Amino acid sequence: TPFVRQNTPHPKELKAKAHKLFSKGKNDSRSGSTDEQ
């Protein structure tokens, strides 16, 4: 929903947080889910 996006107080902060989480999750998944891929 775009209206929820506009409601975000700090989209940059959220993006940075998501990026950090995404990067961490990706790295973790890659380290543990290597056999699955």
Image (cartoon, rainbow, N blue to C red):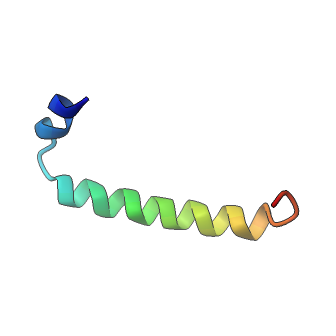
32 relative to 15 in the view: left or right = right
Give the percent coordinates (x, y) of residue 1.
26, 29
Residue at 30% from the left image edge and 64% from the top image edge: 16
Rendering quarter of residue 26: bottom right
Rendering quarter of residue 3: top left
In the figure, 1 relative to 29: above or below? above
Residue sitting at the far right: 35
Rendering quarter of residue 17: bottom left
Residue at 81% from the left image edge and 66% from the top image edge: 34
Q: Quadrant of the C terminus?
A: bottom right
Residue at 18% from the left image edge and 52% from the top image edge: 11
| Count of numbered tags | 0
The front one of 10 and 1 is 1
26 relative to 2 in the view: left or right = right
Give the percent coordinates (x, y) of residue 29.
69, 61
31 relative to 23 in the view: left or right = right
Residue at 12% from the left image edge and 38% from the top image edge: 6
Give the percent coordinates (x, y) of residue 14.
27, 54
